[in-house]
Amino acid sequence: MLQMKLCGDLVLRTKCDPVSAITPELLSTMDEMVKMMEEQNGVGLAAPQVGILSRFLVMMDPDSKQVFRMINPRIVSYGEDKCTMEEGCLSVLGSDDLPVYSNVTRPSSVIVEWTDETGKQLSAQMMGLPARIVQHETDHLDGVLFIDHLSPVRREMVMRKVRRRK
């Protein structure tokens, strides 16, 4: 049974290693991560959030409900246009055990390449919410949290809410 790692756990600050083989264990873990994501009303979950230091993630396009299982995802291009939207994270919880949110500015489109669960190499241009989600989740694979994109003052406001939980 996988357990969610929370802000303060060093696993969330560690750069992940590439996945070298698609194994039954990996596929089972990804299936369990999809269930966790859905149960917690999330739209993405990266391996370090469940304590695994490997480069894979699951995410859902909220509009189409399509679920992506991405192994070794890599953003190869960022669009020039930026967009500011509210972001939260299943690993950054406040005193009410719900995600803490803050506005984050990111590119509004990306081109991402990854290997799917069958071993097929895929590439897609993502825009809007899916682009934001894949950027947020690939950040996790590099030990980066959404709070790292905030100004020091805004970050401290978020962390004050997180500390109240403890």
Image: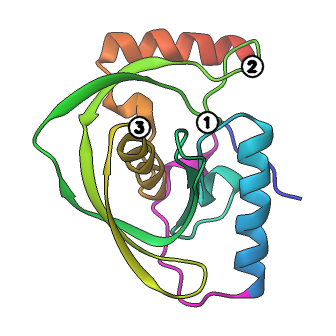
| Dominant secondary structure, magenta | loop
Task: Check disc 3 and report its element: helix, strand or loop.
Answer: helix
| Tag count | 3
8 w.r.t. 86: above or below: below
Q: Earlier in the sequence, mark 1 or mark 2?
A: 1
Question: Is 42 situated left or right of 36 in this image?
Answer: left
Give the percent coordinates (x, y) of residue 118: 59, 86
The vertical placement of 95 against 47, above or below, is above
Callouts 1 and 2 close, C-beta under 8 Å? yes
Is there any visible trace of residue 75 in the rendered image? yes
Tag 1: amino acid: Gly
Whether residue 147 sits left or right of residue 126 in the image: it is right
Give the extent of the magenta segment. Answer: 7-23
Position of the C terminus by quadrant: top right
Instruction: Compute the Cα span from label 1 to label 2.
Output: 10 Å
Q: Quick one: label 3, few (<14), some, or many (20+) residues within 10 Å?
A: some
| Pointer 3 with pointer 2, Cβ within 8 A | no
Q: Which mark is residue 166?
A: 2
Asked if residue 160 lies left or right of residue 78, the reply is right
Residue at which label 1 appears: 8
Q: Which mark is residue 151?
A: none
* Of residues 148 and 33, the one drawn nearer to the viewer in this rendering: 33
Residue 53 x, y percent position in the rendering? 59, 66
- Residue lying at 56% horizontally and 10% vertically, measured from the top left: 160
Say whether disc 1 or disc 3 marks the residue closer to the N-terminus: 1
Q: In the rendered image of this protein, does residue 123 appear above or below residue 35?
A: below
